[in-house]
């Protein structure tokens, strides 16, 4: 905000937020009343909340994808064996060969 111009001329992208913050700051006796405007301006500059939300959404997506993949692997293993294991009528692995 040093020059008041954007990279390609004209108004910078966060200028409106800066104007709101500077207007609030100039009119108040207690600067802490302008924290909402300051947060809006800083979010416009740095996108910290937006980045944090995007990371959280991505982490949740990865967690769900891993969970679904794990469940599918379990189902695929059971189908690949081709036997009914849950009832206990057919033994799996070495236990079936030892009897």
Image (cartoon, grey):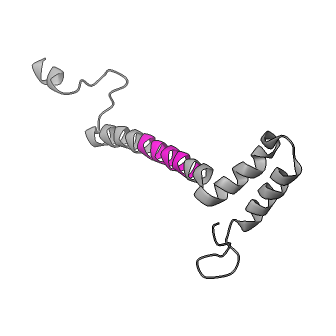
Q: Residue at x 88, y 51 (%)?
A: 27
Q: Residue at x 41, y 39 (%)?
A: 71
Question: In the image, residue 1 lies at what x, y percent?
Answer: 65, 66
Residue 37 higher or lower than 7, as above or below = above
Question: In the image, residue 22 lies at what x, y percent?
Answer: 79, 57
Task: Report whether 5 appears left or right of 29.
Answer: left
Q: Is residue 59 magenta?
A: yes
Question: In the image, residue 26 lies at what x, y percent?
Answer: 84, 53
Please name whichever residue, 61 or 50, is drawn nearer the observer in this view of the structure: 50
Counting labels gives: 0
Please name whichever residue, 21 or 79, is drawn nearer the observer in this view of the structure: 21
List the single residue furthest toward the top: 99
Task: Report whether 31 appears left or right of 67.
Answer: right
Task: Report whether 28 appears left or right of 39.
Answer: right
Q: Is residue 36 magenta?
A: no
What type of secondary structure mainly makes up the magenta span? helix
List the single residue furthest toward the left: 98
Quarter of the image with the C terminus in it: top left
Choose top left, top right, bottom left or bottom right for residue 35: top right
Choose top left, top right, bottom left or bottom right for residue 43: bottom right
Task: Report whether 10 appears left or right of 29.
Answer: left
Question: In the image, residue 82 lies at what x, y percent?
Answer: 29, 39
Q: Residue at x 32, y 27 (%)?
A: 85
Q: Which residues are magenta?
A: 53-67
Q: Residue at x 79, y 62 (%)?
A: 19
Please name whichever residue, 5 or 58, is drawn nearer the observer in this view of the structure: 5
């Amino acid at each position: 905000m040093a020059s008041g111009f954007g990279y390609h001329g004209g108004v910078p992208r966060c200028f409106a937020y800066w104007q709101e913050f500077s207007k609030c700051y100039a009119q108040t006796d207690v600067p802490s009343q302008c924290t909402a405007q300051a947060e809006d301006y800083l979010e416009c500059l740095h996108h910290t909340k937006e980045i944090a939300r995007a990371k959280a959404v991505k982490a949740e997506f990865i967690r769900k994808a891993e969970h679904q993949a794990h469940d599918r692997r379990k189902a695929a293993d059971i189908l690949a064996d081709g036997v009914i294991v849950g009832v206990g009528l057919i033994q799996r692995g070495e236990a079936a060969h030892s009897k």
